[in-house]
Image (cartoon, coloured by chain):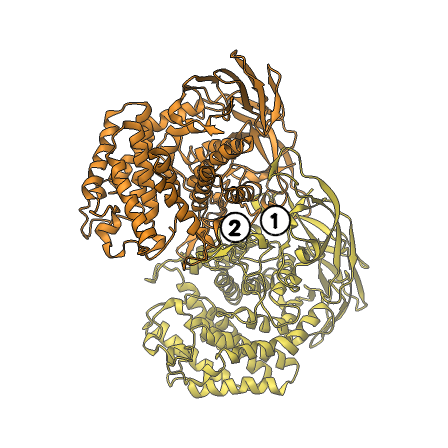
Chain colours: A orange, B yellow
Amino acid sequence: MQTYRFDKVDITSGYLFGKQELNRKTTINAVYDRFYETGRIGAFDFDYVPAEDRKPPHVYWDSDVAKWMEGAAYILKKYPTPELEEKVDALVERIKANQCEDGYFNIHFTVVAPEDRFKYREKHELYCAGHLMEAAVAYDEATGKRDFLTCMEKYADHIARVFIEEKSAVFQTPGHEEIEIALVRMYLHTGKKKYLDMAKFFIDARGSSETSERKDPQIQSHKPVREQTEAVGHSVRAMYLYTAMAYLAAETDDEELKNACRALWDDVTLRKMYVTGGVGSTYIGEAFTKPYDLPNDGAYTETCAGIGLMFFANAMLALENDAKYADIIERVLYNGVLSGLSLDGISFFYENPLEINLLEHFENERGKRKFPITQRVECFSCSCCPPNLNRLLPSLGNYIYGTDGGTLYVNQFVSSKLEDGGVVCKVTTDYPVSGSIRIEAQGAEKLAIRIPEWCGKFEIDREYAIEKGYAVIENDGESVNISFDMTPKTVYADPRVLRDCSRLCVMRGPIVYCAEGVDNGENLHAYSVPCDFECAEKECAEFGLPILEVTASRLLPFEGGLYSSRRPEKVSATLKMIPYNCFANRGETDMIVWLHAE
Amino acid sequence: MQTYRFDKVDITSGYLFGKQELNRKTTINAVYDRFYETGRIGAFDFDYVPAEDRKPPHVYWDSDVAKWMEGAAYILKKYPTPELEEKVDALVERIKANQCEDGYFNIHFTVVAPEDRFKYREKHELYCAGHLMEAAVAYDEATGKRDFLTCMEKYADHIARVFIEEKSAVFQTPGHEEIEIALVRMYLHTGKKKYLDMAKFFIDARGSSETSERKDPQIQSHKPVREQTEAVGHSVRAMYLYTAMAYLAAETDDEELKNACRALWDDVTLRKMYVTGGVGSTYIGEAFTKPYDLPNDGAYTETCAGIGLMFFANAMLALENDAKYADIIERVLYNGVLSGLSLDGISFFYENPLEINLLEHFENERGKRKFPITQRVECFSCSCCPPNLNRLLPSLGNYIYGTDGGTLYVNQFVSSKLEDGGVVCKVTTDYPVSGSIRIEAQGAEKLAIRIPEWCGKFEIDREYAIEKGYAVIENDGESVNISFDMTPKTVYADPRVLRDCSRLCVMRGPIVYCAEGVDNGENLHAYSVPCDFECAEKECAEFGLPILEVTASRLLPFEGGLYSSRRPEKVSATLKMIPYNCFANRGETDMIVWLHAE
């Protein structure tokens, strides 16, 4: 299918609308302010000189700010906001003023280490370039101001010269993928095929025996991409590469590349993905590990990797017209991505663990035992996740609708309006608070409505046929009513996930729930939940989603020694559960997703 | 009670006799050979000069060899072994030849860094001195050759001068306790009270506001020892300190010190001890952490800390006449200490984890996720545990009998003979293979036979009264027959130990059992065991203890995706369990002690 871009789609109310508004009114400014305070914005003045009180611009900084600019552009596309536009314009002015004659643009490698230009594969130059290009495309689309894009076209041409024509760079493919995505977007926006060729060059060269580069699984260059079947290495890099591969496969109709994408998709989602949609099981290299290795307390699951999985999934959805891709978008968005943002919109998780046991957070001067932080922070030294949320949230419209032939696809359930020429579709729902959805569409012969994989029971007031996870109906222009059963239910993991054996997870619709110490006391492992638990739902304005009160048992502490042949006594208890994406918003406390099953 | 020293006790057959023989015939020589190959033995020549192919003698090395010498002395006390005696004599010769004029003896601080003598609290000088003193006492006791002891008396006098009279050392108390134990032993052996006074000096000065030293919980110097109630810091250091405190309290009848020992004992055994008797929950600082923090796969539980807990327990047993101390000796000896030695007697664990999941042993060039090693090795760079086993095993006789008034205590059940003047006691048993024990004693009015805390059912063919965990009977000189029920049973942990919630452990008598991947397949977490499991016992010559076949269930892997609302299918299975102390003797494989409970 052709998925509709967010510019054709207005999200009008409901849960995700709330998140968009939070970003537009708070998060986008909070991230800018932190970037200003930390010198990231000022760095665009290119006036850095070594001094005791100045931090040298870091190799990541261009990309942090570029993602913020891209997010600002998406907001500007829908909401004229002069103060925001001025901030972007000021940055674009500095970019214009400080771009090198030859087109090169990078703060660190101009003001700190000009002698190191294109020398170190691991130093994020092409990654920064890619994010700047994406931002430039977005800003041109949003405002029609072409200066930024002109700069980035010039930079892209310089990169083509150095990497493809002259081959004068010390490395051939980037250590952190991103530019491949950006170049496809440059091509789609400008229509200039040279950018698609560049994307293809970087993708084809990766891991190829024709390059002398180190074959490194950490950066997915251990073999040619078409031969890759297992998700390996740095999880964000992997997601960006796979997304670019799927984009390129769509544009070039490259069946071999599509097959690699399918195999990688399966490996990620059938063997290496948390129930929250998070990916990346270890902070060591921020990486994928082995199939079924999904530790909960040590989960890495970077917010950016979740966002990357959404990109990859949307690209695969476009290729395959299969609802399973939209299912994963829903899973990761509502759980492992939104958990990255605090309810007040100003603090962020980089990692999104599925369990916190403060008892085990031992630290002394010799080291620290547990790594995932337990509280969101306002800025990281490598602050990639906050501006990634800035660009994701205003562009959520990208994930809702698609079209193929005369069929209009409804992939996500969001109160929204699609308008594209003669095609108009209006969805009204408070999903995922309830499971009731009304759809009215004009200009489409058929409607394909995703039936979420989590949903065991649903009703549609039309005749339908199920095709690749969609309920397909003839469209008569009248409103269609769908109702998904949102009764909270028990979810189990494949027993090969050893940490989830004898455990269960509670989901309500697409929302994964967790229990926190602040509600339930110190040791959440003392609770066990019957598989057929009963459950009361309570509205919760703070979370925007209901909280659950689940029937459970709780083990009582021993009174004598540590070990006994008498089984610990169990008492009835009620376990208060909140949406996982809301965890850690009420102070530092224990948290658990995978509960002990009775 | 007065516990009998091993020189009065011959272990004659059975499981522990086998371990003694393994040590005498194999381990003592294997450790010597590794110490020879690594330069530890040669270092006593004091001929080190910096050269590319020579490692400088490490600050630990004196203590590694000293513990080996102490172990050799214990063997020589019972078994004349000329080759072994020659090796010790040769070392003693080098010690005599190379001791400084003023009595100082330390290889590293003579040949590598003479300018640093007694400057760095953390550099193990007094720790090495203590181990040399213990070895010297043992060697004098074993052979009557006094030279070594004479050297060490001279060294002790030098230490008294520097630390107590002149106060010219840069620090006041050692960073690693040990010399306190050694000085009490020097006092007990020589009768010279000055050594007891020295021990008291170092114990009293520790954490005292009268010293300017850093108050550091890692080395138990955060407060005066009499005010300490919580086990903190490095677990081996803690055990050695608490042992010395209990020794000193006994000799000086210091009630305040006894109370501190009681509080520390309770904190260790009621809140911070694994079911194997292992102590120390993190490799970070090799340390104690918080109460109930007992992770299984990340357990630190150094073999030396287990041995230290035996020392501490035996000292407390002497003070308190309470079987609970002998219970812990049994627990840690049979489980967390013997696990440190391979069945072939030549390889060693430093850490003794309670769970191994190879799936989670992820490693890339950026780091390693799991730290406890999964296979024993022949020598460590800090190889303290192997010679600690060398000295423990031949002196196991220290833990079996005690006397108080006319009562003879039988603390451990080992085929053995005690002879001390008119007191003779013969114990015949194959414990812990079976629970049948025959005791014949002369020269004692009463017999106090420990009823192990793990034992729910026992028979004695006499009338008895239970006192502090002992069955006390009038002794008529005829054989007494005791039978402990050895039926394997389920043990639970206090639910505050979060990692053991919903888990159970299988014990047979004092032996903790585990399941290994090599017997049961890859994912041991897929098994669950009913609390009232049935069990077949099979003899196993290799392990010297029966193996168990336990009724269990096993979860089957999913066939579709990772997550499902359908509960994983369960099939009946038999779980083969082996004694925990035998784990990792058949290649690298998964292992689990705390099984999922049904």
The residue to which callout 2 is attached is A227
Q: What element does badge 1 sit on?
A: loop
* Residue B426 percent across, percent down from the top left: 75, 71
Amino acid at the residue labelled 2: Glu
Q: Is residue B29 left or right of residue A81?
A: right
Report the number of numbered marks.
2
Amino acid at the residue labelled 1: Gly
- The single residue placed furthest to the top in the displayed view is A478
Quick check: can you spot residue B131?
yes
Label drawn at residue A561: 1
Q: Is residue B232 above or below residue B29?
A: above
For this rendering, which residue is in front, A196 or A62?
Answer: A196
**Chain under disc 2:** A
Q: Is residue A344 above or below residue B525?
A: above
Which residue: 32% across, 42% down? A63
Q: Quadrant of residue A594?
A: top right
Label 1: how many residues lie within 10 Å, few (<14), some (14-19) or many (20+)? few
Q: CA distance from mark 2 to mark 1?
A: 57 Å
Quick check: can you spot residue B230?
no
